[in-house]
Amino acid sequence: PDAALVPAPIAPLERKDVGVSSPRRQQQAGNDGELALWSMHWKPRPAANWEGRRVLSFVAGRPETIAPFQEAISKRHSLLSVGTTQEADLVVNLHALEERPLDALSTLAGNLPQVVAVTRNGAAVLGTEGPAPLQAALRTFALVVGQEQALFKRSVLDVSESFDVDEVLRELLDNEGPHFRALRNGRVWEPAVARLPQSRRIKFQPGGVYLFIGGLGRFGRWLSHCASRVQ
């Protein structure tokens, strides 16, 4: 591909994660069949801070899923209270903690102003986890809903098999945090992107045969176009 090609669309990362692409960066996208790619990694971030009273509403299929959060609020969080979805400042969907992540879609797609879905093992943050595909899919769904509906705020907080309820409550109330973050070993992590080093970049070979899986979107068409132009 030549320098005249537009940069590849990046998904499902938020636009602010990548930054504005300068003409020089576009020209560095590679020549002679080389693709300059970016990879996602995780980086730690400061724990959330919030002030003021908040009303939370929890959505789950079983009362025992909500009980630990209600107990923590009643005993240790005097500025928090639990209410209905209509009166709540934030709706927290816990269906994924019950291994029913698809049940969270209706809440994320609804008309509630602010929704956070709590997933379990939906991301490989430390490199030792095996992410559950359906848990991981909620992240992209929440991002798309938030992009298409500007008045709605959607985010996902991922936890490991065992988690601290107080840490989850603290991060749930972070309105300024990224749309996706994770809790691991008492730390908060957020996704970031970095340019792949030269040794890890992909280069199409003239005459090569390549199979793109799920390549019907903008990125797949862009990648196919790049491959077809290699001489």
Image (cartoon, helix red, strand yellow):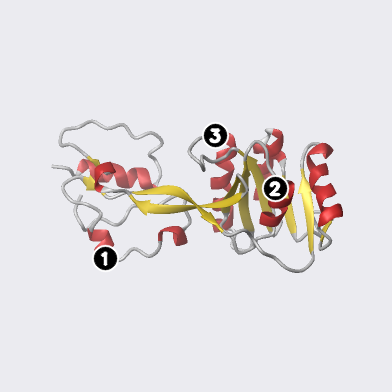
Which amino acid type is shown beneath numbered disc 1?
Pro
**Circle 2 residue:** 107
From mark 2 to mark 1, how far is it between C-alphas? 41 Å
Which is nearer the N-term, disc 1 or disc 3? Answer: 1
Task: Say the numbered circle drawn on residue 207.
Answer: none
Cβ–Cβ under 8 Å for marks 2 and 1: no
**Circle 1 residue:** 23
Report helix, strand or loop for mark 3.
Answer: helix
| Residue beneath the point at 58% across and 56% down | 146
Q: Position of residue 74 (x, y in %)?
A: 86, 53
Q: How crowded is mark 2: few (under 14 residues within 10 Å), some or many (20 or more)?
A: some
Which amino acid type is shown beneath numbered disc 2?
Thr
From mark 3 to mark 2, how far is it between C-alphas? 19 Å
In the picture shown, does residue 140 fall above or below 212? below
Task: Say the numbered circle drawn on residue 133.
Answer: 3
In the picture shown, does residue 68 fall above or below 132? below
Q: Position of residue 164 (x, y in %)?
A: 71, 45
Which is nearer the N-term, disc 2 or disc 1? Answer: 1
| Residue beneath the point at 35% across and 43% down | 220
Q: Where is residue 135 in the image (x, y as percent from the top left)?
A: 59, 38
